Image (cartoon, rainbow, N blue to C red):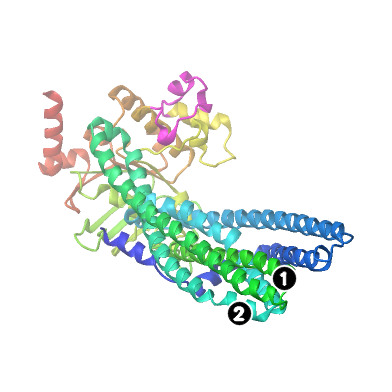
Amino acid sequence: MPSRIREEEEVLAKAYDSRLAGRLLKYLTPYRFVVALSVLLLLLVSASELVGPYLVKVGIDKYISKGDPTGLPLLAALFVLSLLVAFVLRYWQVYMMNKTGQQVMADLRAEIFSHLQQLSVSFFDKNPVGRLLTRVTNDVEVLNELVTNGVVAIFGDIFTLVGIAVVLVAMNSRLALVIFTVVPCIFVATLMFRKNVRIAYSMVRARIARVNAFLQETLSGIRIVQAFVREQRTMAQFDRLNASHLEAYLKSVLYHSIFFPVMELIGAVAVALIIWYGGGRALQGALTIGALVAFLQYTQRFFRPISDLSEKYNTMQAAMASAERIFNLLDTEPEIKDAANPVHVGRLRGKVEFDGVTFSYDRGEEVLKNVSFKVDEGKTLAIVGATGAGKTTLMSLLSRFYELQDGSIRVDGTDIREIPEKELRENIAIVPQDVFLFSATIEENLRMGKTNLTKDQIVEAARKVQAHDFISRLARGYDEEVGERGVTLSVGQRQLVSFARALLHEPSILVLDEATSSVDPETEFRIRKAVRSLLRGRTSIVIAHRLSTIRSADRIIVLHKGSVREEGTHEELMGKRGIYSRLWELQFAEQAS
């Protein structure tokens, strides 16, 4: 079992934590009036439920045993009234707490989602998306159960227990003590149930997280699964995870199926004691028949809140585990932070300088080693090299997706670590090789939330990158839904949309990361022709495997195993007869063959 899963299960098995409970209660603060009113209503419900058995006692002792029916209609009316009052009060209490619980959970989900968007890219490299989804869905739902049926309901159960105990002692202290002799049995049964169910819940929560992570990964790569005919093997993996989750869940079912019959048995023993001892006392005239019947009714009601409290305790245990994971997530600090005294740059001119940049993802093997180069304002720099040379890493560092370990990157002479992240990224637009489109319309994907863009501007940007023709041929044009990750568009079409999106961003620095690798040669030619004028006045950095696309670049650098090995124009590099020259010859030899 992976260590991360083991750690998660250990967290799930932790006992109640008052610190976590205190943090959870802070989310109820905006709704404290409603919570207080709900507690009051619950206390009134508990009080109204104590009335019924006592009215039965009065009816039997004062009227039925004496053959006097005159007071029975009033008692019956009061009995029904107590039930109606309890019904109305409980309705409003349940409604208010469930509504409050949903509001609290909506607040918590919004906070988690907002926090996730602020975390650094490196965090998502180490944490499966499926497990993060579990935090936002399953764990939040567990907390909802705590808010709606846990914290407040406990007050009602405790008040009911105390109220029944007080009434029993007041009616007949000896018989009450006889009933209380079964309490140690209840305590032992509850303690064993609580311990075992807590462990079972731990396993359930950990294993559902594993199922979610596997589902997310598999469904995201469903095309690869089908392309390599991996359905059966993938199904076998899912069956193992699913069976593991089922096994854990059935254990919790087993403990429930044992605990509640045991509680019923203990309750039956208590009733038998009442009949035995209380019946004897009634025959001796030391206890009225009405009191005996009331004792039986109160005893049956006495065991219900005890069972509820045991369930609520386990609800709190599960909630503490979920809270632990949620707050661990919320307490995770972004690795990339703005400087204490940031330099506000506004619109950048676009001069970029890498100075002795060294970087490794896992503090192990260095991906970049002492990389230095400059890109003057409005110029085009091309970066070439074998796969894994560090080309894309350079662009990730420029956008501060990761923090470099040594050296510096400056834009317009200012270290990017001193520029607020938002301002820096507003000046940079990236057209990646693996284009991501949201499940929205083409226009919404082009706007990316920029409501100030006019339709004419959007269409004009699409025309410039040769995307307007294929968009206009779609059934709904710019209002066409592209599906999840843009699945309804071809790879080349997605890249064209991404290119138009970058242009609408109006960046000072434009990064093309293998941006034409999946575009057919004819479309690529049209794009190159269209963007020459667009790149004028903007600093552009082009990462390319197709060397023909960067022949006219102002400067070309060749990365090899994380280091800059060659630098110059196309003609200069060809004249050196080095790595670039060999790459050029190999590429065009392949095309010729």
User: In the image, is 90 to the left or to the right of 189?
Assistant: right
Q: Amino acid at mark 1?
A: Ala
Q: Is residue 231 magenta?
A: no
Residue 270 image position (x, y, % from top left): 56, 69
- Pick whichever, 536 or 136, lies toward us: 136
Which residue is pictured at 26% across the width and 36% down the height? 550
The answer to whether 411 is drawn above or below residue 226 in the figure is: below
Q: Secondary structure at mark 1?
A: helix
User: In the image, is 538 to the left or to the right of 100?
Assistant: left
Residue 8 image position (x, y, % from top left): 36, 62
Q: Which residues are magenta?
A: 465-489
The answer to whether 526 is drawn above or below residue 313 in the figure is: above
Residue 92 image position (x, y, % from top left): 72, 55
Residue 391 image position (x, y, % from top left): 26, 48
The answer to whether 389 is drawn above or below residue 472 in the figure is: below
Label 1: how many Cα within 10 Å (few below 14, some 14–19, many 20+): many
**Residue 123, image quadrant:** bottom left
Q: Secondary structure at mark 2?
A: helix
Which residue is pictured at 87% across the width and 59% down the height? 69
Q: Which mark is residue 177?
A: 2
Examine the rendering and report whether any part of residue 412 can be seen.
no
Which residue is pictured at 44% across the width and 46% down the height? 508
Q: Nearer the viewer, mark 1 or mark 2?
A: 1
Q: Kindly identify which residue carries mark 1.
A: 291
Q: Is residue 466 magenta?
A: yes
Examine the rendering and report whether any part of residue 259 can be seen.
yes
- Pick whichever, 219 or 330, lies toward us: 219
Separation of marks 1 and 2 at Cα, in angstroms = 15 Å
Split into 4 quadrants, where in the image is the C terminus?
top left
